[in-house]
């Protein structure tokens, strides 16, 4: 979603701002802009569409200055247009904003009473006008920024740039992330640490309620009442190599294809973190809990749903899973010793953060299973378990999903052993199988040609069903999400047993059904469900191993061949053909694979 970047230093700001905005492109946006101070005067350039439009505009109409702010906007209030693009300006102040200002209509009405009108449909413009109004009352920039943020309701990360203030940037955060980068005689401000790649690795993460005053000589932090706050610098390592696609056409393909290497590294690192053989504090915390709630959004919520089976079946723990945006509407009394496990790639998803806060307010302990170790969620959760997927750029999550599953199954196995539900022999068997996953993921990738051919057929469909049983059911939901989000083909995931309770009515010769049927306890029943589909003319794509494909009734289906795998780990490996299927369908249909329409990588608004 939206990205903010600020620069204050010795070099021309515009190219630095543009480069940094490019590093945040993966988050999703539909317009962009920058503002700088040249000889004390504010100048702005904004463009709808991709950053190339802004870059072209800057070539035709450059702006100078050694201090500036930039923004990529993902439209919330008002369409993606130049007028709605940030930074917004009110004579002497320019503002870039992430989040939603909930009381902006009220502020608009108030400002209108003073004869102040708005050009855009955005909530952000009201913050700029309010700040200018306060400057007009004789306030200093710091006082005006502080009084502005005090008035705002909702979530925000804000960057303020003031005319005639060549050595000042002001930033404020409530719920939306912001980080300040410290360079040599230069300072940076970013909403995403990846934007700082190649610029600095010394950073200060701002907390909620922080107002940051940034000058070339450093950073001062206050709260919204003006009291000084102490924030420490930390060193981060920002992997800028992930910013390249390698030999692939899209980041999504690169991230699908690097899974064997990433899974191997993740398993190795988890071994070090979770001390598989000697349970550590995380394993103990889960083992001691009476009830587990697994919460996430989208793909992460399907990882939660799969893990629900694992915690119940391997560790004998009552577990339930749900989507974060709904969890906050539930006020069920928490069992004593409930542990909330929050799964998130970014650690910045507004719905997941709200759910985590909701859980904490109600006295539950929280464990965050995260990819971005420096995220807001990592600072708010009681315990953190990293998944080690590396930076994920494509909006559609692939390697983060399989790494979430690896982390969760590792935890469930360790907890099961700790609680005595799994004996040593079984435990060691599971660890051996876990170690085979990177090799099996390589084998799964070799179904690429089958996936491409199936995708060609599917890309002509109006709708596709995905079915599975046990952990293959939530994986069917994930397969459907992956297909719809990047190819825009309607898709639905179903528990195979539910077909005849309604959805079978949809099946005719135009319907493609993807059946997830690894050999194992649910194979026979799932294949019987595919027979019901075939009997009604439906087109079945059967995902199974050689043994399964040999015994499945012949005729009427296409196959994707998977390696034989222990059913416990099947969702991790069967995720890969589903990613390939969605990817090839999207390429076939010519969609913007890495930046699907209307979507953002990091969903920082509710
Ligand atoms: C789908 C996808 C989304 C995210 C969801 C949660 O491919 O990526 O459904 O899984 O927005 O994001 P995180 O994991 O960052 O909380």
Image (spheres, helix red, strand yellow):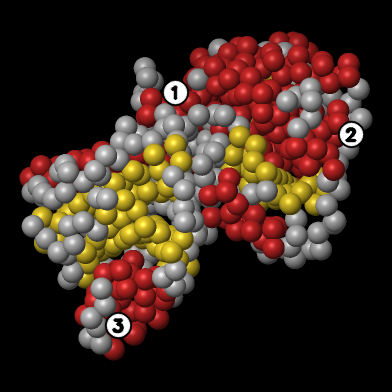
* Residue 30 vs residue 467, the one in the foreground: 30
Counting residues from the start of the chain, the first of labels 2 and 3 encountered is: 3
Residue 103: quadrant of the picture: bottom left
Camera-side mark, 2 or 1: 2
Q: Is residue 586 above or below residue 451?
A: below
Counting residues from the start of the chain, the first of labels 3 and 1 encountered is: 3
Q: Which residue is mark 3?
A: 111
- Residue 562 x, y percent position in the rendering: 65, 16
Numbered disc total:
3
Q: Which mark is residue 419?
A: 2
* Residue 540 vs residue 363, the one in the foreground: 363
Q: Is residue 562 above or below residue 588?
A: above
Where disc 1 sits, the SS reads helix
Disc 3: CA contacts within 10 A as few (<14), some (14-19) or many (>=20): some
Q: Which residue is mark 1?
A: 254
* Residue 255 vs residue 234, the one in the foreground: 234
Q: Which mark is residue 526?
A: none
């Amino acid at each position: 979603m939206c990205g903010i970047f600020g620069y204050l230093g010795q070099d021309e700001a515009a190219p630095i701002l543009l480069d940094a905005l490019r590093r945040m492109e993966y988050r999703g946006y539909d317009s962009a802009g920058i503002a700088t101070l040249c000889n004390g005067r504010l100048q702005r350039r904004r463009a709808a569409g991709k950053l190339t439009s802004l870059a072209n505009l800057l070539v035709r109409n450059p702006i100078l200055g050694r201090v500036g702010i930039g923004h990529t906007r993902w439209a919330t209030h008002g369409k993606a247009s130049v007028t709605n693009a940030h930074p917004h300006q009110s004579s002497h102040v320019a503002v870039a904003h992430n989040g939603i200002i909930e009381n902006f209509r009220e502020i608009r009405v108030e400002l209108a009473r003073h004869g102040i009108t708005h050009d855009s449909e955005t909530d952000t413009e009201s913050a700029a006008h309010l700040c200018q109004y306060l400057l007009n009352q004789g306030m200093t920039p710091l006082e005006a920024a502080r009084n502005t943020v005090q008035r705002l309701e909702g979530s925000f990360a804000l960057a303020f740039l003031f005319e005639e203030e060549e050595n000042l940037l002001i930033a404020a955060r409530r719920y939306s992330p912001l980080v300040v980068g410290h360079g040599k005689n230069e300072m940076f401000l970013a909403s995403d640490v990846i934007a700082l790649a190649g610029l600095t690795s010394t950073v200060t993460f701002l907390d909620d309620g922080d107002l940051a005053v940034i000058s070339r000589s450093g950073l001062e932090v206050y709260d919204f009442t003006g009291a000084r706050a102490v924030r420490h610098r930390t060193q981060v390592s920002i992997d800028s190599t992930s910013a390249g696609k390698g030999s692939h056409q899209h980041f999504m393909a690169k991230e699908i294809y690097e899974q064997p290497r990433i899974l191997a590294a993740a398993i190795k690192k988890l071994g070090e973190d979770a001390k598989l053989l000697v349970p550590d504090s995380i394993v103990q915390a889960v083992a001691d809990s009476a009830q587990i709630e697994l919460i996430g959004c989208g793909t992460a919520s399907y990882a939660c749903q799969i893990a629900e089976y694992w915690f119940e079946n391997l560790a004998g723990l009552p577990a339930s899973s749900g989507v974060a945006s709904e969890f906050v509407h539930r006020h069920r009394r928490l069992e004593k010793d409930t542990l909330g496990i929050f799964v998130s790639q970014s650690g910045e998803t507004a719905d997941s953060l709200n759910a985590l806060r909701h859980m904490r307010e109600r006295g539950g302990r929280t464990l965050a299973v995260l990819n971005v170790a420096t995220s807001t969620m990592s600072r708010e959760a009681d315990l953190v378990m990293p998944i080690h997927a590396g930076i994920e750029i494509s909006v559609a999550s692939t390697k983060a999903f399989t790494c979430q599953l690896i982390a969760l199954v590792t935890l469930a196995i360790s907890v099961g052993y700790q609680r005595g539900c799994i004996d040593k022999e079984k435990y060691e068997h599971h660890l051996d199988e876990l170690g085979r996953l990177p090799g099996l993921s390589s084998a799964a990738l070799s179904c690429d040609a089958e996936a491409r051919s199936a995708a060609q057929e599917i890309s002509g469909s109006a709708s596709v069903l995905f079915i599975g049983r046990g952990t293959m059911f939530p994986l069917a939901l994930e397969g459907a999400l992956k297909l719809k989000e990047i190819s825009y083909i309607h898709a639905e995931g179903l528990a195979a047993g539910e077909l005849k309770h309604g959805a079978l009515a949809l099946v005719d010769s135009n319907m493609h059904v993807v059946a997830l049927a690894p050999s194992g306890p649910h194979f026979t029943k799932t294949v019987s469900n595919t027979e019901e589909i075939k009997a009604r003319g439906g087109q079945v794509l059967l995902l199974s191993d050689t043994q399964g494909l040999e015994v499945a009734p012949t005729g009427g289906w296409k196959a994707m061949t998977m390696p034989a795998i222990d059913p416990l780990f099947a969702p991790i490996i069967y995720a890969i053909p589903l990613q390939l299927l969605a990817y090839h369908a999207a390429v076939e249909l010519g969609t913007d694979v890495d930046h699907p329409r209307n979507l953002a990588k990091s969903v920082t608004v509710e």
